[in-house]
Amino acid sequence: MNISSKIMGFSCLLVFLAIGCNSAQKGTTTAKKETSVATKTMVKTPSRPNIIMIMCDDLGYSDVGFNGSKDIKTPNLDALAANGTKFSAAYVPHPFCGPSRAGIMTGRYAHKIGAQFNLPPNSETIGEGIDINEKFFSKVLQESGYKTGLVGKWHLGAVQKYHPNNRGFDDFYGFLGGGHSYFPDDYREKYAQQKANGRKVIFEYLLPLEHNGKEVRENEYLTDALSAQGVRFIDESAKKDSPFFLFMSYNAPHTPLEAKEEDMALYANIKDKKRRTYAAMVHAVDRGVGELVAQLKASGEYENTLIVFLSDNGGRTDRGGTNYPLKEGKGSVFEGGFRVPMFFHWNGVVPAGKTYDSPISALDLYPTFAKLADATIPTTKALDGKDIWNDFMMQKPIRENENIFTMRHRNGYTDVGVRNGEWKAVKVYQQKWKLFNIEDDIEEATDVSANHPTILKELVAQAEAWSKTNIQPRWWHNEKTGVEWKADGMPDFDKTFKLD
């Protein structure tokens, strides 16, 4: 049976089981009626746990101890991973941070909602953000009675209607743009200088942090400040009767590479300064995770909290990150661009000491969180992920014979990656399509398309069908890209999906 037949058959089985999934080529699910997503399960799981999603920014696949790092020490993350289940094949929906985060929060590929590019710096000047008709899972949880908090990076719209407090977060402490400088004395001075010089638009990395729309004067190194705010949110939420959801959205180890001297000193043995600074930045995140866990235990919430850890995309190899054994890094449709370190931890519930090897997508978090929260997903909400909880808990394959896509546009061309089971087809820039057995060749070193032309043809056809569900970008990461996009007649998928 070929891949297409398997996908069609599996889709029919899903429909028969009333999961409500249509074709894997589209990869979209829509609820048929307004109903609680808490369906009958084969696994007994406590209902409505607290949920903490900890996300790093540009963290490399191999830059945490639990995923093989030898030079960066992450004891707190490693302890959670060891007492939980690691995912060896976890994918985010895009190799850049803005589209990846948009996909995770909406449960949809960013290309389907016009968010396939990062918002430009100081996006308030264009007034754009993620479509308000796309309900974030934070809103779904909030409407189900969860207290919801976001600490750190947003990058999904800087004007009021796109503000976190209007997208399902009761409490927001952080910054609205795509990044921020780390040392308050430094960024405050630069901010004051630009303001004194009459700059109308001050670079977003220098702007004051905010708490629910009001500027705050932060005095701590940024990563430590965010960790402290996460601790505050847990402490306050634990005193309420309702469960809570906390999105710890660290911007480390995203550039600028800035670390505390005492953390740098711990990595004096690393000769390369970029790598040494990067390591110290990851170390600060790990320290913060330890503080969050300590607060959960002190508040009596540790046993009733699901902790999910991941990165928003691959690490930047030109800025200290490593993605071994994956190929390339941030921005790439090879594995290093969108395959990320990830684990689930829930003491006494999530299996301890396990590794889950079946591919999963961060798009699955939306329906999975909603299911665990006993929340209701609107009938009109399309989703590109699926509730994975039962299959994950039973160590069963989650998306056997279903596709995971990624796509990146650049310089008049489109890069595409599509994985189905053991196979992955890749098209990069001006090169020909290639095929890899990703289970045997995780490094994507050997193109086997000549040996399996039918498999390559089917995967390319399925990726092309998926591309037809995408829409034009609503913005570009800079003005030049927008001009070139129109001049080149992009996305020009006829060129992309041509097999020569």
Image: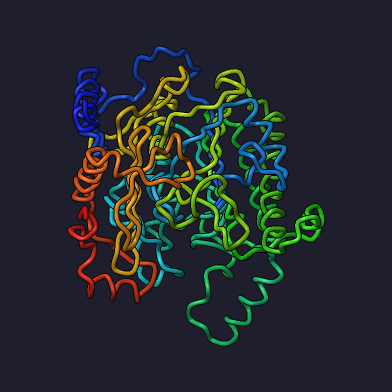
User: Picture coordinates of residue 474 (x, y %)?
Assistant: 28, 62
User: Picture coordinates of residue 67 (x, y %)?
Assistant: 61, 38
Residue at 40 percent across and 48 percent down: it is 167
Image height of 394 relative to 22, above or below: above
Q: Is residue 175 left or right of residue 390?
A: right
Q: Would you identify the image quadrant in which residue 287 lies? A: top right
Most extreme residue toward the front is 451
Q: Would you identify the image quadrant in which residue 130 lies? A: bottom left
Q: Is residue 454 left or right of residue 104?
A: left
Image height of 419 relative to 133, above or below: above
In which quadrant of the rendered image does the C terminus lie? bottom left
Q: Is residue 275 left or right of residue 112?
A: right
Determine if residue 151 is in view.
no
Residue at 67 percent across and 40 percent down: it is 65
Q: Nearer the viewer, residue 456 or 100?
A: 456
User: Picture coordinates of residue 368 (x, y %)?
Assistant: 41, 30
The total of numbered circles placed on residues is: 0
User: Picture coordinates of residue 399 (x, y %)?
Assistant: 35, 29
Determine if residue 267 is in view.
yes
Image height of 73 relative to 117, above or below: above
Most extreme residue toward the bottom is 197
What's the colour scheme? rainbow
In which quadrant of the rendered image does the N terminus lie? top left
Q: Would you identify the image quadrant in which residue 448 lies? A: top left
